[in-house]
Amino acid sequence: MGRGRLLYAQSGGVTAVINATAAAVIETARAARVPVLAARNGILGALREDLIDTTKETRSAIAALRHTPGGAFGSCRYKLRSLEHNRAEYERLIAVFRAHDIRWFLYNGGNDSADTALKISQIGQELGYPINVIGVPKTVDNDLAVTDTCPGFGSVAKYIAVSVAEASLDVESMCESSTKVFIVEVMGRHAGWIAAASGMAARKAGEPPHLILFPEIPFDEAQFLQRVKACVEKVGYCTVVASEGIRNKAGQFLAEAGTRDAFGHTQLGGVAPFLAERVKAKLGYKYHWALPDYLQRSARHLASKTDVLQAYAVGKAAVEYAMAGRNAVMPVIVRTSDTPYRWKIEPAPLSKVANHEKKLPKSFITKDGYGITAAARRYLEPLIRGEDPPPYGRDGLPIYVRLENRSVSRTLPAYTIDDR
Amino acid sequence: MGRGRLLYAQSGGVTAVINATAAAVIETARAARVPVLAARNGILGALREDLIDTTKETRSAIAALRHTPGGAFGSCRYKLRSLEHNRAEYERLIAVFRAHDIRWFLYNGGNDSADTALKISQIGQELGYPINVIGVPKTVDNDLAVTDTCPGFGSVAKYIAVSVAEASLDVESMCESSTKVFIVEVMGRHAGWIAAASGMAARKAGEPPHLILFPEIPFDEAQFLQRVKACVEKVGYCTVVASEGIRNKAGQFLAEAGTRDAFGHTQLGGVAPFLAERVKAKLGYKYHWALPDYLQRSARHLASKTDVLQAYAVGKAAVEYAMAGRNAVMPVIVRTSDTPYRWKIEPAPLSKVANHEKKLPKSFITKDGYGITAAARRYLEPLIRGEDPPPYGRDGLPIYVRLENRSVSRTLPAYTIDDR
């Protein structure tokens, strides 16, 4: 393919399968004889000229990324400001690209990253440096626009559905003389995709989870407690799945930790203990609650095969689009059929993805606000389908790879990031 | 084998593999042509004459118990009082046994259940009703005396080790600009077996978890914070595993919910958020914490094969002991070799098991109090070895069985349990 290198960077919260995308990028580029550099810790590494030479990694190490969770090159929470506010940052990126003959930049992330990728694609043109920028989708939150689903989501969805089914069997066994209300808090700041996925644990009506609390539905405590009581009286126990992002009628988060991350998002956590306390205080039931937190998004051991295949497919397509000279696009997943499930990858303009947020459709939530509909099940089921376990060692642990991550020599002056 | 029936009951907190024991009991008894009844909700069902006829279940349903978490017949937290304090309760049990021609009683539980089994074995002799009582070991806490390990523990151990390894890869990817301290709270009220198991996540020195907080070691906040800080400064982040049962130097639980269960045990929960707040307040690091709660003990999808085999083996041996006319014994696991790992099942007197509690040996905790030794690793490694995934359906979920659980007709007057 001639000269030039491809730069790959991971951004935002990592997932169980983002490294499968990385494996696809590197393997596809290697087949096209294009060297791949990776930015250490996402865009921060690109700004600092802190680059990793992936050509030093063995073929088997790259292949093992396919089944290794976390972000192999490091990721970051860092949002580039607008061109007007920090043009120097964009110019620095172009300087780094120029210094390392980077012709293609692949940015693997969510909404904010699509926005960053779009901006870089524009400044490249403006500064007269030919750079093809491809956004690569990833987010457990499943809230990217255009794409049918986001790599990372299917595996969290499967983990949460399986975990809720398993823990509910536990609670059911003991409910007569022990825990009657079990609350699981799941991720999903503004959209209830993961909460909805928990509903897949129920194969038949009446099976747990009995109540799902979505961020899309304002929380009504009196009604919630009434539903919990009715459920316990009917089936002996109640499994509740609560999104971390549920809010009261005034729009306030139920559990607000009061801290904000680099993107200005509120750091949430602690809805489950809050709800548990209300249940205890008002209904007197013994409770337990679980908050799997990062366990849910890193559980590669229980990844969805559909998700792994799609994570790989978007990485492969991203390199192909780059090689074909496309710019400012993202490979997205297009669903062509529910039954049998069929999908394909297509390019979508980054401008249609950047900064949009895909909410859970109203048609996915039951009228009462506490469950998922048949339409939701049709959507979700193929996404959690199939298993793709990692290899395990003789010691009973999965064999996850740790790359060498050898640095490329710097050629530019040091750059200090204004981390605000 | 002639007439007579065997009664099986599950007691206390259930596990990912207690139903594998149930499968072994029923399959072994069926092979010996002994009908098995199960008490619904443990000893409560035996007292109420609320019995399940397992002969109505298909062979495939019983086989599927081997890979189904929870307690298939229901369990309970209910401790029989001493013979002196409630002799009527014991007499009622014998009346139920007599009414249903129950000659063998298998009680599948932990310390308290071994004590109950021992008492029933004694009253049978005293009341002139021939009953053979066998205790069958089970507990995720791994705190039963005599046995090398307890069925249920190996699977929690594997789940926690794998989850800590996975989530740490996630944290490591993001630590430069996001979470620096990640705290996982694990079960284990008085003994740090599960906390110790998390140490298996580290294949090499320096790998996470970086700090383990054991209930055996009084918590020293200043020292803990110092260790967290040193770790973050050295490797960029710190993974902490905290037992729910850690106490301060005065012997008080760090997080005391203030409620007590039927055995008089304090209901714990919330050490992780407490520690996280201290880290934030004193060191200013961004944190996340996870509290998997019941997810850890019901995660049959990630069961240890060693654990499943042992859970089955104790159930099989229990029936064999019963048929051989033994009384007041428990099949225990005897380790005959670490490398290669070899074990066998032997009978142990219930009197040696009942009410004893096996603490984590001091030799398993490193001198600094925050890690596990090579001796601990030698002990733990075989217990988490091997995978035994359940079958999955086309829908991406494990296929867990729900039994028919048909009731046996009652023949005795109703009995009211004095539930204090």
Image: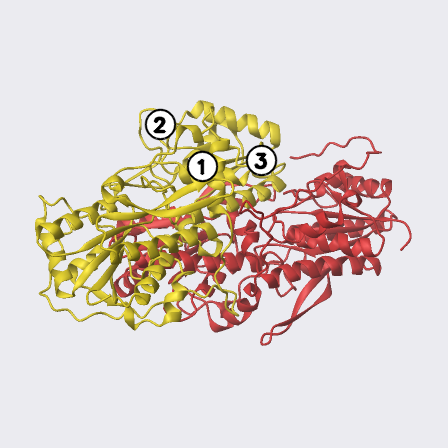
Chain colours: A red, B yellow
* Mark toward the start of the polypeptide (3 vs 2): 3
Mark whose residue sits in front, 3 or 2:
3
- Which residue is at a point 61% across and 60% down the rendered structure image? A307
x 12%, y 65%: residue: B99
Q: Residue at x 28, y 48 (%)?
A: B330
- Residue A78 lies left or right of residue B229; in this view the side is right
Q: Quadrant of residue A385?
A: bottom right
Q: Residues within 10 Å of mark 3 (few under 14, many from 20)?
A: some
Say which quadrant the C terminus of chain A sits in: top right
- Foreground residue among A214 and B217: B217
Judging by the rendered image, the residue that carries numbered circle 1 is B196
Chain of the residue where label 3 is placed in the rendered structure: B
* Element type where label 2 sits in the image: loop
Cα separation, mark 2 vs mark 1, equals: 19 Å
Query: Gap between marks 3 and 1, in whole Å?
Result: 14 Å
Work out whether B309 lies above or below B53: above
Mark 3 and mark 1 in contact? Answer it, CB < 8 Å. Answer: no
Amino acid at the residue labelled 3: Glu
Residue linked to disc 2:
B248
Front one among A175 and A324:
A175
Q: Which amino acid, mark 1?
A: Ala
Residue wearing tag 3: B207
For the point 24% across and 44% down, which residue is it? Answer: B350
Residue A185 image position (x, y, % from top left) = 44, 51
Label 2 marks a residue whose chain is B
B294 sits left or right of B301 in the view: left
Query: To which quarter of the image does residue A21 belong?
Result: bottom right
Residue B176 at what x, y percent from top left? Answer: 63, 36
Question: For the residue marked with disc 2, what is the amino acid?
Answer: Asn
